[in-house]
Image (cartoon, rainbow, N blue to C red):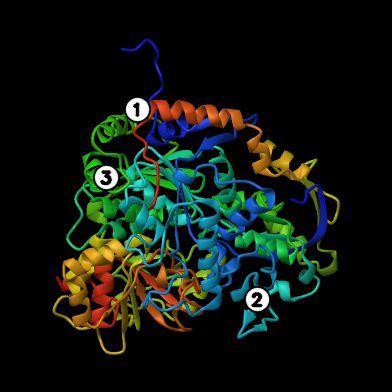
Amino acid sequence: MSGQATAPRTLFDKIWQSHVVERLEDGTAILYIDRHLVHEVTSPQAFEGLRMSGRQVRRPDATIAVADHNVPTSDRNKPIEEPESRLQIETLERNVAEFGVPYFPLLSARQGIVHIVGPEQGISLPGMTIVCGDSHTSTHGALGALAFGIGTSEVEHVLATQTLLQKPARNMLVRVEGALAPGVTAKDVMLAIIGTIGTAGGTGHVIEYAGSAIRSLDMAGRMTICNMSIEAGARAGLVAPDETTFAYVEGRPFAPKGEAFAQAVEYWRTLPSDSGAHYDRVVELRAGDISPLVTWGTSPEDVVAITGVVPDPASAPDEARRAQLQRMLDYMGLSAGQRMTDVAVDTVFIGSCTNGRIEDMRAAAHVASGRRVAPGVRAMVVPGSGIVKQQAEAEGLDRIFRDAGFEWREAGCSMCLGMNPDKLTPGQRCASTSNRNFEGRQGPGGRTHLLSPAMAAAAAVTGRLTDVRELV
Amino acid sequence: MQPFTTLTAVAAPLPEANIDTDKIIPSRFLKTIKRSGLGANLFDPLRYQDGVERPDFVLNREPYRHAGILIAHENFGCGSSREHAPWALLDFGIRCVIAPSFADIFHSNCFKNGILPIRLPREICDQLMQDATQGANSRLTIDLQRQVVVRPDGQEIGFEVDALRRHRLLEGLDDIGQTLQHGDAIDGYERERSASQSWMPAIAVS
């Protein structure tokens, strides 16, 4: 027993407290940032701000830049046709050169979606504070890092000071116990969580995911879960680092090596929440209750089992909610009581920071193997990074996809948000492994159903939303 | 940053929950390298159809074309972290948003741009929404110094705001300049960390 008794702390408390540089008068902390990930869309105004005030990047060696949102996923050797996208990428390249920021160029295999690249390269590590001008920075929480999205003013603040002004979040625990049924993936678990707590359920909180169902997930699955923490309103998601985490990190290009790695692991083992640590809110789900899910509406909380039906606005608790449900059904072109498996799709998108890792490619290829994309369906597979693409090709997954009639493309954010040429046209309906089904998210007037990679592949080969358990 | 002290302006009612930042400014308008000029596409999917104004959308009607305050329902600004959302509001002329709740990142982004987000209970928002339907009389006053919203009939409603954020908004202070005054503390933290966590790798790309 040490003489000093400290109250049991959560994983979040530990990371937070070890990064407070100074506490200001009203409880706001100057929080130190270990890793800053930069992309082309939310950084130009931040670099411009530095330039105008004559400031430098304080820690280029803690910063990495990569273009992902705008990049075409077609032939990389051709110039970018869209002039505004080209300007944003050229601006990023000018800024990283001027400020000395490390950068993975477009033609490098290391290029990819920033949230795929960080963990893949060992840039994101347990116990760190990690930020990026992108809400899906929560992805890196799967490593047991405090990772969250920030605005462009904060990007400039981190570039200039390597800190952020933050107030501590509240602690929330989401525990999922039990074994996942066959055909149920991390994506389904997260959709179930969002369906349970709602899109504002985590506001003001950092969610720690725990329980045997989470522990048994590989790192890719944990990243899928943490990725969509923002869709539950939370600032960040966390999974305690364990042997799965250490095995994932070891040997990655930017991870500590040899003795340094051993020292790091020793530190990382102190991070998991202490027993008896206080959570402001606890939510429990039973893994066995979760089935393959899809969204039917225009908010990620609008989830239903693939075996279920479109909800009836008439059953809504009040008039406002009834009107909202009806508006969503009108937008989505669905009618109350319609079976989800009767919903035909014309587009399938497999990729994004939510589900663009090699494990996701394998899950989709497993379903696609020996089958054909249904007539009239455009199905695209967009690996999350050049490294994911190379690995998939080494495993022959590209061949499986191409033989089945899927498009096999270059890495980027692509149709998750439609900033590049990959977007839906009005009225098109997409089975998508991405993270947001907001109106117009994948293109103006486009309709999005969120689901897992295996379910997306199943929809591609049948031409309608499909229970993947019937195909495998 | 322009200081925020008091604001008297037309308030526009937008009685909808979960207004996400894709709806405030869709991704296709994020391909800019500037902060200005986004007001024309604020709420683009609600405001326009096939490039033509929808006459039923509030900001396409008088007096709300000149709104300086927006009143909405729960979870305003959810989704993407894009600061283009507050930039678009500001460019349109909106300097205050009142709602029962906000998404965290949007809420923080507002303060960085001289926009005041005010959280008030749903029933109060509904009352203010009612005030806001009074056409030319739909003017509210926001007094940040006294932390009150003044309704058209003179009734005052108090609101909470973080002390530090309030101070910086009132003075128009820039966060980076303020933080750099703590440069010694940051230097000290870095020295201590590089000693205690010498395993921490540096990023360099050749």
| Quadrant of the drawing holding the C terminus of chain A | bottom left
In this picture, residue B114 sits left or right of residue A18: right
Q: Are marks 1 and 3 in one subunit? A: yes
Q: Are marks 1 and 2 in one subunit? A: no
> Can I make out residue A323 in this image?
no
What secondary structure is found at the residue carrying circle 1?
loop
In this picture, residue A176 sits left or right of residue A421: left
Q: Are marks 2 and 3 in one subunit? A: no
Instruction: Please identify, in this view, whether the residue under mark 2 or under mark 3 is nearer the observer.
Output: 3
Q: Residue at x 16, y 81 (%)?
A: A371
Q: Relative to B112, is A187 above or below?
A: below
Mark 1 is on which residue type?
Answer: Gly
User: Quick one: label 1, few (<14), some, or many (20+) residues within 10 Å?
Assistant: few
Residue of label 1: A276
Q: Position of residue A234 (x, y in %)?
A: 46, 49
Residue of label 3: A249
What's the CA distance linking mark 2 and mark 3? 47 Å
**Foreground pick, B111 / B193:** B193
Residue of label 2: B47
Residue reaching furthest front? B206
| Contact, mark 2 vs mark 3 (Cβ under 8 Å) | no
Mark 3 is on which residue type?
Answer: Val
Q: Relative to B43, is B99 above or below?
A: above
Q: Position of residue A310 (x, y in %)?
A: 38, 73
Q: Earlier in the sequence, mark 1 or mark 3?
A: 3
What's the CA distance linking mark 1 and mark 3? 28 Å
**Foreground pick, B94 / A162:** A162
**Foreground pick, B30 / A185:** B30
Q: Quadrant of residue A401?
A: bottom left
Instruction: Please identify, in this view, whether the residue under mark 1 or under mark 3 is nearer the observer.
Output: 3
What's the CA distance linking mark 1 and mark 2? 51 Å
